[in-house]
Amino acid sequence: SAIVDGASRFMIFRRIVLPMAKGGIAATAVLCFIFSWTEFLFALTLTTTSLKTVPVVSSTFVTSIGTAWGNMAALGAASIIPAFIFILLVQKHLVRGLTMGSLKQ
């Protein structure tokens, strides 16, 4: 019906397809962020010592002498903050996109 009203293909994509796909895009963004944030194996084997990620640094607190639980807890609490902020920013789009198909307007 948008073509009958004179909309171009780009207009159809921008005004119809993207708003309906916003929830799926937000869910994919959250999952990609979380999976890349917690990736351990590739970060351990492919990065240098100056570019360690949070999971790799947290594994260095476990040694043969013992485990530095305080340092590990502090790093864990600090590493949650960026993911929490990102999910809070995306939450509005995620909820709106998931409920868009179920509501009549």
Image (cartoon, helix red, strand yellow):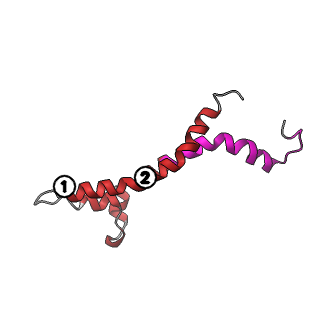
Instruction: Determine the residue positioned at 52% across, 50% down.
Output: 89
Identify the element where label 2 is drawn: helix
Lateral position of residue 89 relative to residue 69, left or right: right
Where is residue 95? Give x, y as percent. 56, 38
Q: Nearer the viewer, residue 29 or 92?
A: 92
Up the image or down, 76 lies above or below 23; here it is: below
CB atoms of marks 1 and 2 within 8 Å? no
* Residue 5 highlighted magenta (yes or no): yes
Q: Amino acid at mark 2?
A: Ala
Instruction: Identify the mark at residue 69; answer none if there is no mark.
Output: 1
Where is residue 62? Give x, y as percent. 19, 58
Q: Amino acid at mark 1?
A: Trp
Q: Which residue is mark 2?
A: 83
Where is residue 36? Give x, y as percent. 43, 54
Q: Write the start and end of the magenta stretch as one range.
A: 3-30
* Residue 80 highlighted magenta (yes or no): no
Instruction: Determine the residue positioned at 84% across, 35% down.
Output: 1
Graded by Cα atoms within 10 Å as few (under 14), some (14 to 19) or many (20 or more), the crowding at tag 1 reads few
Name the N-terminal-most of marks 1 and 2: 1
For the stretch drawn in magenta, what is the main secondary structure? helix
Instruction: Identify the mark at residue 3; answer none if there is no mark.
Output: none
Where is residue 48? Give x, y as percent. 34, 70
Identify the element where label 1 is drawn: helix
The quarter of the image holding the C terminus is top right
